[in-house]
């Protein structure tokens, strides 16, 4: 777009004139936001932490649904918590799209297992999932635990299994996870923040 010198001065003069008139009190009246119904006015506000990375940004989650009538709550909006000292209300692109992740029809809400030789996933209970994981860990540890290395030095390690911890967990949970896993001899520990 080519702007001549004369057009540039006209635009500048119009802008200066308009802002001067507004400063003298001839501006239009302020729009009243109270007149319309704000979509979050009747929503329940819940504070939470973003599950994606180790930054642990604060969230405000707004949901509708009457708790006294035991109706199903539905999340209608998620935004950054301005009172949180970590993020001060801002969110990264993943955190800003958190509502889509929570309400995704592809989101898993229960443990699933695919048996050997099968092509189908089947839903199992949390107790069954924990029992299965425990049995697999025990079998692998019994088969692959090393008490000594090739030089005869006592090492007591379990090199064939690793653990990926949640980076959004608190310090206490991380400390306990590391202590339990190291006591089992596990040497490969990491957190999702590095992935």
Image (cartoon, grey):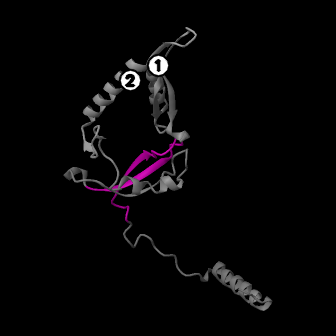
Q: Residue furthest left?
A: 69
Q: Residue at x 46, y 73 (%)?
A: 32
- Residue 4 horizontal/vertical position (percent): 77, 90
Q: Residue furthest bottom?
A: 6
Q: Nearer the viewer, mark 1 or mark 2?
A: 2
Counting residues from the start of the chain, the first of labels 1 and 2 encountered is: 2
Q: Is residue 132 above or below residue 38?
A: above
* 60 vs 39: above or below: above
Rendered residue at 51%/33% (across/down): 190
Which of 105 and 99 lies nearest the eye of the viewer?
Answer: 105
Magenta stretch: includes residue 61 = yes
Observer able to see residue 44: no
Q: Secondary structure at mark 1?
A: loop
Q: Residue at x 50, y 29 (%)?
A: 189
Q: Where does label 1 land, which residue? A: 185
Out of 29 and 173, give the one closest to the viewer: 173
In the image, residue 151 lies at what x, y percent? 58, 10
Tell me the residue that label 2 is attached to.
140
Tell me if mark 2 has few (under 14), some (14-19) or many (20+) residues whose alpha carbon lies within 10 angstroms of its own: some
Residue bounds of the magenta highlight: 39-65
């Amino acid at each position: 777009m080519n702007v001549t010198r004369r057009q540039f001065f006209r635009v500048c003069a119009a802008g200066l004139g308009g802002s001067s008139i507004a400063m003298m009190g001839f501006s239009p009246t302020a729009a009243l936001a109270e007149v319309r119904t704000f979509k979050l006015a009747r929503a329940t506000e819940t504070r939470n932490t973003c599950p994606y990375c180790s930054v642990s940004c604060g969230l405000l989650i707004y949901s509708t649904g009457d708790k006294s009538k035991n109706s199903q709550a539905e999340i209608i909006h998620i935004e950054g918590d301005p009172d949180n000292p970590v993020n001060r209300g801002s969110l990264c692109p993943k955190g800003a799209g958190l509502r889509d992740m929570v309400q995704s029809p592809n989101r898993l809400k229960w443990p699933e297992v695919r048996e050997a030789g099968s092509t189908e996933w089947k839903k199992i209970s949390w107790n069954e999932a924990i029992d299965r994981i425990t049995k697999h860990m025990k079998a692998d540890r019994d088969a692959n635990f090393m008490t000594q290395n090739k030089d005869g030095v006592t090492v007591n390690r379990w090199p064939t299994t690793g653990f990926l911890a949640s980076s959004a967990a608190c310090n206490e949970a991380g400390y306990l996870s590391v202590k339990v896993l190291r006591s089992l001899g596990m040497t490969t520990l990491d957190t999702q923040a590095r992935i």
